[in-house]
Image (spheres, grey):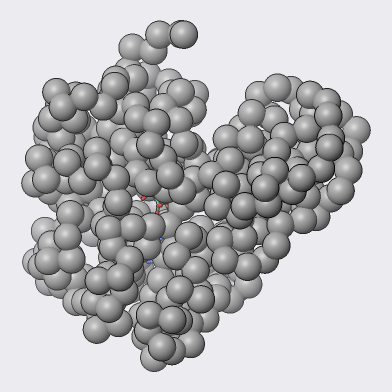
Amino acid sequence: MKFYSNIFKATKKNILKASLLIKSGTVVAIPTETVYGLAGNALKSSAVKKIYQLKKRPKHNPLIVHFSSLEAIKQIAVVHPDCIKLAKKFSPGPITYVLPIKKNSGISPLVLNSKKQIACRIPNHKTFLSILKQSEVPIAAPSANMSNAVSTLRAVDVHKEFGSKIKMILDTNKIKIGLESTVIKFGSTIQILRPGAITKEMLEKTLRKKVSLPAKFKTIEAPGQMKKHYSPGIPVYLNQKKEKPNGALLVFGRYKLKGRHIFYLSKKSSLEEAAKNLYVLLRTAKEKGFKNISVHPIPNKGIGRAINDRLTRAAG
Ligand code: TXA
Ligand code: MG
C-alpha cells in the first residue's frame, strides 16, 4: 500500500492529537458516519477561514457545526420544540438542524447564514465524538472535498483532494452512510433543505406533521441546493439503461452485466447500499479514465430521494 505522510490510523493517541490540533486552530480531516469532514474550531474565525480557503468555498455558503450533545447546542442556539423531538429520536445521527444563534455564543460569525442561523449536528461516529469531547469545542466541518466536487468516504480520497495542505487525515473504515446529512429548517412549516438518510417519511412520523421537500433549486438557502454541486468532473447521465461511448455505467439491481465499465451500486436493489457506494463509484469511474457516467434509474423513495438529489446536481 502507498504511504501518505498525513494519513494516520485513528488510534487513541492520534485521536487525542487531532483534538488538540483542532482546539489550537489547525484544520484536520476526520470521518463522520455520513462522509469525511474538514474540521476546525468553530470558536476561531482563523480556523473557519482556513476551511473556506482549503475548499475554495464561496463565503456565502455557511458551515455545519458539530456538537457532542443537545445540551451543548442549547447553550449557543435557540432550540425549536420540534428540534428537541427530532434530536431525541435521531441524534446523534445524520441530521442537521438550522437554528437561530444566541447572542454572545462565541461561535465564529463566518459559519452562519445571512439570517444569523447556525446549522447544528451531533454526528454518530465514535472518533468524531471523542474528538468533540477531548477538544472541548464545537467543530465546524463541511464535507472534506473541494467546493462543487464529490464528498469523500476514504482517507486516500481526502488526500487526493487536498494533498499535504492538511496536516492530518484520520483513517477509519467506518463510514456507514455515504451521503451527507439531512438538513432541516424550522418555521411555520418544517422544511428539508437537503434530503439525506433521515427521510421525509421518518420526520413526519416522529413529528406527526407535514414536512416539505426542497423547493426545486429556486432559492439558495442551503447552497447544497446550488445546481452545479457534487460533480465528479465528467458528464453524468441519469435514468440510463445503457452506457454511452467511452462511458461507465452504474447499475442498480440484479442484472448480469459484465465489462470494466460496469459498476454495481447495489445488486440486491438496496438503496442504503447504493447510497454508500455512490461517491466512491463516481470517483472510481473518473479515475479509471471513463469520459462520462450513465446511471440506472434509482427509485425515488426513502434515501433514494437523497441519491437522486445528488445525482441531479452531479448531472448539472
Ligand atoms: O453529513 C454532513 O452533513 C457532512 C458531515 C461532515 O457532517 N457535512 C456536510 O457539510 O455535508 P457541507 O458543508 O458539505 O454541507 C452543508 C450544507 C450545505 O448545503 C450548506 O449550505 C448547508 O448545509 N448549511 C450550512 N449551514 C447552514 C445554515 N446556517 N443555514 C442553512 N443551510 C446551511
Ligand atoms: Mg459538501
Question: Along the horizontal axis of the image, is 133 left or right of 177?
Answer: left
Residue 202, placed above or below residue 236:
below
Residue depicted at x 61% and y 47%: 274
Residue depicted at x 64% and y 28%: 284
Q: Is residue 238 visible?
A: yes
**Quadrant hosting residue 99:** bottom left
Residue depicted at x 41% and y 88%: 208
Residue 202, placed above or below residue 143:
below
**Quadrant hosting residue 144:** top left
Name the spot of residue 120 as percent of width and height, x first: 28, 62
Name the spot of residue 224 as percent of width and height, x first: 51, 58
Question: Along the horizontal axis of the image, is 119 left or right of 228?
Answer: left
The residue lying toward the viewer, choosing from 44 and 255, is 255
Name the spot of residue 179 as percent of width and height, x first: 50, 50
Please give the count of numbered marks on the rendered protein: 0
Question: Along the horizontal axis of the image, is 227 left or right of 292?
Answer: left
Q: Is residue 194 visible?
A: no
